[in-house]
Amino acid sequence: MDSTAGNLRLGRRVAAVSIGASCLLSLSNVWIGYAAGSTSVVAAGFEFLGDVLASVLVLAGMTLAARPADAEHPYGHGRIEILSGLGVGVILAAGGLGICARSLRNITEQHPPPGLYSVWPLLAAIVIRAAMSTLKFRVGRRIGSASLIADAWNDAVDILSASAALCALGLTLYDPGRFLSADHYGGFAVGLFVIYTGGRVLRETSLDLIDTMPAQELIDRIKAAALQVDGVQGVEKCYARKTGLQHHVDLHVEVDPRITVADSHEIAANVRTHIRAALPEIADVLVHLEPAGMGDA
């Protein structure tokens, strides 16, 4: 539990840094985009505003997920962290639709080309998002945070969308007579990237919420750890579901059918203790005992 609490604290710190970075990028892009008359830069700014909301949701989810288990929530509150990741997906998908609609509005209207200085907030966004995405992926995978990894994917796509906006803006600045509308299409491309990211995040977090089995590699490690315990002759079944940053496991182990109930109970307790000590990503293990050589009987 100490390790889980430490992981949640680390995740909250990363989310807090992300909120500050997203606020800075959102304000600078919207302000400079409006001042320079660039649709794609303004679209990127509104995208970063959605990132602020997403990161706030991640931070709130991790804070609530840190609450200890109680009588009404014996598995803890970890699923709140997954729900926050689902919320990030919803925000991204809805925000992407709004950005697309706004970017295509008045696309045929004649107006002065954007100012050259409008490229700077997009360049800054690419650099800052690259750093934040790398940090979130590293920490999210280390602590097993669905919402932080979802936010990292969001940052990764922000790099692509900002690059697309920069290319479109560059066309408009290069030849306003021929490519004046390219700036609008750049904003539309930003919206499409955001919608794609939202869909990906929704899919991945939904799989966790419906108790999809984890990767086979984790199942194999759980079985191997169980077989290291004295008295365990085999592993018949192993199921696991994600409940926040960790997994809860249902494990069927085979023991000698001739031993006493007390001895069987001791083996089960040893299996539970050993797996939790060997695999920090496992929150708890429910051990079922089966007579060796008799299968499901």
Image (tube, helix red, strand yellow):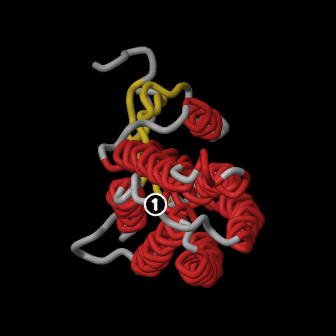
Where residue 159 appears, as percent x and y from the top left, is 66, 55
Identify the residue at horizontal 58%, vertical 39% (top origin).
222
Viewer-side residue, 118 vs 227: 118
Element at badge 1? loop
Viewer-side residue, 121 vs 141: 121
Where residue 228 appears, as percent x and y from the top left, is 67, 37
Identify the residue at horizontal 64%, vertical 40% (top origin).
225
> Is 77 left, or right, of 6 in this rendering?
left
Q: Which residue is mark 1?
A: 110
Q: Quadrant of the N terminus?
A: bottom right
Going by the picture, which residue comes out furthest to the left?
72
> Which residue type does callout 1 highlight?
Gln
How packed is label 1: few (under 14 Cα within 10 Å), some, or many (20 or more)? few
- Quadrant in the rendering for residue 103: bottom left
Where residue 20 appears, as percent x and y from the top left, is 61, 84
Identify the residue at horizontal 40%, vertical 79% (top origin).
64
Can residue 1 be seen in the rendering of this structure? no
Where residue 83 appears, as percent x and y from the top left, is 35, 62
Can residue 44 be seen in the rendering of this structure? yes
- Vertical placement of 28 versus 222: above or below? below
> Is 46 left, or right, of 279 in this rendering?
left
Identify the residue at horizontal 46%, vertical 79% (top origin).
56
Viewer-side residue, 76 vs 153: 153
- Quadrant in the rendering for residue 259: top left
Viewer-side residue, 111 vs 93: 111
